[in-house]
Amino acid sequence: MPGNSTPAYYNAPLQTWDDAARRAHQAARFDAMAATLLERNAFYRAKWADLPAEHVNYAHLAELPFTRKRELLEDQAAHGPFGTNLTYPLGDYIRMHQTSGTTGTPLRVLDTRRAWDWWGECWRYVLDAAGVTRDDVVMLAFSFGPFIGFWSAQEAVGQMGALMLSGGGMTSAQRLHAMRELGATVLLCTPSYALHLAEEAEAEGIDLARDLKVRVTVHAGEPGAGIPATRERIETLWGVTAFDHPGASEVGAYGYSCATREGVHVNEAEFIAEVVDPATGAAVEPGQEGELVLTNLGRDCFPVVRYRTGDVVRARARGLCGCGRTTLLLEGGILGRSDDMVTVRGVNVFPSAFLEIFNRIPGVVEHRITAYRAEFLDQLHVEFECTDNRDRRAAVSQAIRDALGIRVSLHQCPPESLPRYELKAKRFFDRRTEDWQPGTAA
């Protein structure tokens, strides 16, 4: 049936093609998908209704309208429960996942058998770049709820033929003991949770580098492993090499870091990437910051065409990376979220910048940022937690001024008082439209 055959997607593990080959590959894939969507997908048929049919193709991609998450959410609200962005009959679909809902109402995403195989194959590129093989023992430290991230990683580990240890339903201590007793060599989890596991290991008397065999960690779900200070902290605590993987439930597993540690590659065999000015939608030049726009090519059952991710990136001009790949490299990974940027005294600040700062200050283990308004200006209130009660406010204040050139409201919290997260960490709260001031619960 349509959408249920299984093509061999994993055919370019060291993506080294030239620009002409990339464009030809993407054009063939996109044009075939676009024809299917015009015939069978009500959401995109309506979205493209005013365009000449001969312009719905790769050659005229820049003329196609952007897709935004709010459109998909509004469509699902109007045509519940799954909306009209389904290309095949519901009986062809085998899995339903949803976005985390950290920025609002969760979006439901559905996959056919073919698309689910594609998810696993996309994750294979991630694991390949991290040096994971079928001889590894892989721990997935993940609760296995509706969030898609590590479900798709599990699919990839199974396709690869490696031994998988499911950490679902385990406490942090149980996961650590299982990794030690069962000889785990690879850990998959969010970067926040890797740091939390390190705290738990100390409480359990486990020396991660000495007592465990973990040699590689792969992190998804949130920024962190692409931020040098956070990555270095994970690697020091665990004695591993840590790799980053950006992706999105509604888009797919589109990126991975390589051995050079200079950013993340976009898997251009399966995704078309653009970087645009968030305000105008016009393409920006290589080396300039802009918003990442993605089109998935292997998920025609739930496609997104020119999807505005909201992620701020800086793409390097295409060329040969030190790892041997020629695919688009996003320098420094995901730099921030366009909707999270706060301007404090004329300085544009992304909350993710604080990860770099705090992970370089010994003793600081967790933090929380709240944006608020005071005297008609944007302000930031920063809470941080240390391993002990030693007063580090002066050091933290100076580190923030040195890195960002701003002063913020600071509060040092008692040890173990800020929340810990297994999935995406929620460290940024935007209270600028509310009557909120420091001292109010975040």
Image (cartoon, rainbow, N blue to C red):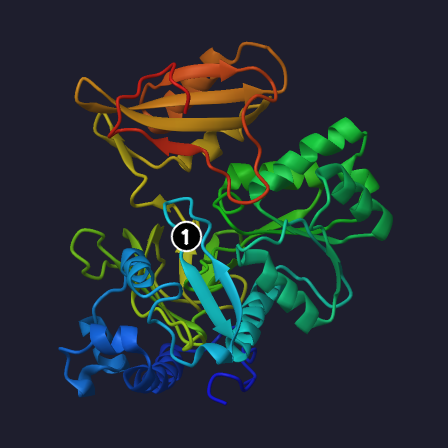
Which is more toward the observer, 21 or 221? 221
Rendered view: 405 above or below 168: above
Residue at x 28%, y 58% (from the top left corner) = 74
Q: Secondary structure at mark 1?
A: loop
| Left or right position of 426 against 61 | right
Residue at x 40%, y 23% (from the top left corner) = 400
| Left or right position of 344 against 204 | left
* Residue 75 screen position, x and y as percent: 29, 63
Residue at x 64%, y 35% (from the top left corner) = 196
Residue type, numbered disc 1: Pro
Rendered view: 397 above or below 249: above
Rendered view: 33 above or below 223: below
Which residue ends up furthest to the right in the rendered image? 181
Which is more toward the observer, 186 or 436? 436
* Residue 20 screen position, x and y as percent: 35, 82
* Residue 67 screen position, x and y as percent: 27, 64
Say few, some or many: other residues with alpha carbon within 10 Å of mark 1 (under 14 / 14 to 19 / 20 or more): some
Residue at x 44%, y 58% (from the top left corner) = 248
Which residue ends up furthest to the bottom in the rendered image? 1
Rendered view: 176 above or below 168: above
**Quarter of the image where the C terminus is located:** top left
Any part of residue 96 in sight = yes
The residue pinned by badge 1 equals 106
